Amino acid sequence: MLEKDLDKLRSLRIGLALSGGSVRGLAHIGVIKALTEIGLNPSVIAGTSVGSLVGASIAAGMEWHEIAEMARSVFWPELLNGDRLERFCEKYLPKTFTELKLPFAAVATLLPKRQAIAIKTGQLASAINASCAIRFLRRPVIREGQKLKDGGMACVLPVLACRELGADFVIASDVWTLSFVLKQIGCKPENNLNGKLYPLHYRQAIENTQMLIQPQIPAIGYLPSDAAIKRMISIGEQATYKALSQLSKV
């Protein structure tokens, strides 16, 4: 991408939307690594599920290598437990949203309406816990009188939450398993014939995204090891540079 094009992007209020995707979210670290290296720093951030954990870390001012070190400090399956996840967040992240350095929203699903809700205030750990309360595996999180579950149920790619925070250019990092599988078999969300295999909230997110990053994550990325983390970061970084090259052709 030409430097003059990058300068134009740097002048915009950039929003970074980080999708859900369980451990695949480690690739988000590589995305922020690449964006930082070229000076495309987000002004606002929104995250769903694992994206809320990585997004909150970025909003707290952590550098990509600090987030990577945080990821290496834990055996990731332990974070499927809500209590452990909250303790993990309390150890590494600020206590409340007001202590973050950038505007941030953690997206969860409000029950029983199954409505997406962007959490922007209050305790940070409980908001991330709610956003990560995976269906079937986790009980709902009761937060400030609301019954909440994994944000991916109603908004797996929180682009519109970035818009609500004031972004005028949204970069979306999509590590969602379903979108990856559908893309592999030739189904695209913009296709009138098979696009409806994607949920409406995902299609709406894609329509409002200016730069879409989709890391190609192999099954080996699920392994809880330092080598897997390094590999996932590299994959996210490569996907970001690929998306930038495609953007320059538009």
Image (cartoon, rainbow, N blue to C red):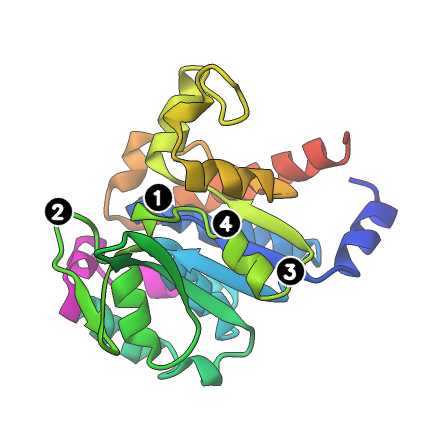
Q: Is residue 53 left or right of residue 242?
A: left
Specify which label sits upstream in the sequence, 2 or 3: 2
Q: Is residue 6 left or right of residue 43?
A: right
Specify which label sits upstream in the sequence, 4 or 2: 4
Q: CA distance from mark 2 to mark 1?
A: 19 Å
Specify the amino acid type for callout 4: Gly
Question: Total number of numbered labels?
Answer: 4
Specify which label sits upstream in the sequence, 1 or 3: 1
Label disc, if present, on residue 154 of the rendered structure: none
Q: Is residue 237 visible?
A: yes
Q: CA distance from mark 1 to mark 3?
A: 25 Å
Q: CA distance from mark 1 to mark 4?
A: 11 Å
- Magenta range: 68-83
From the image, tell me which residue sits under label 3: 167
The quadrant in which the N terminus is found is: top right
Callout 1: 10 Å neighbours few (<14), some, many (20+)? many
Q: Position of residue 174 (x, y in %)?
A: 46, 42
Q: Check if mark 4's residue and mark 2's residue have beta carbons within 8 Å.
A: no
Specify which label sits upstream in the sequence, 3 or 4: 4
Front-lying residue, 141 or 76: 141
From the image, tell me which residue sits under label 2: 136
Q: CA distance from mark 2 to mark 3?
A: 33 Å
Residue depicted at x 47% and y 14%: 193
Mark 1: secondary structure:
helix
Specify the amino acid type for callout 3: Ala
Q: Is residue 73 visible?
A: no
Mark 2: secondary structure:
loop
Q: Main secondary structure of the magenta part?
A: helix
Callout 2: 10 Å neighbours few (<14), some, many (20+)? few
Q: CA distance from mark 3 to mark 4?
A: 21 Å
From the image, tell me which residue sits under label 1: 24
Q: Is residue 219 above or below residue 131?
A: above
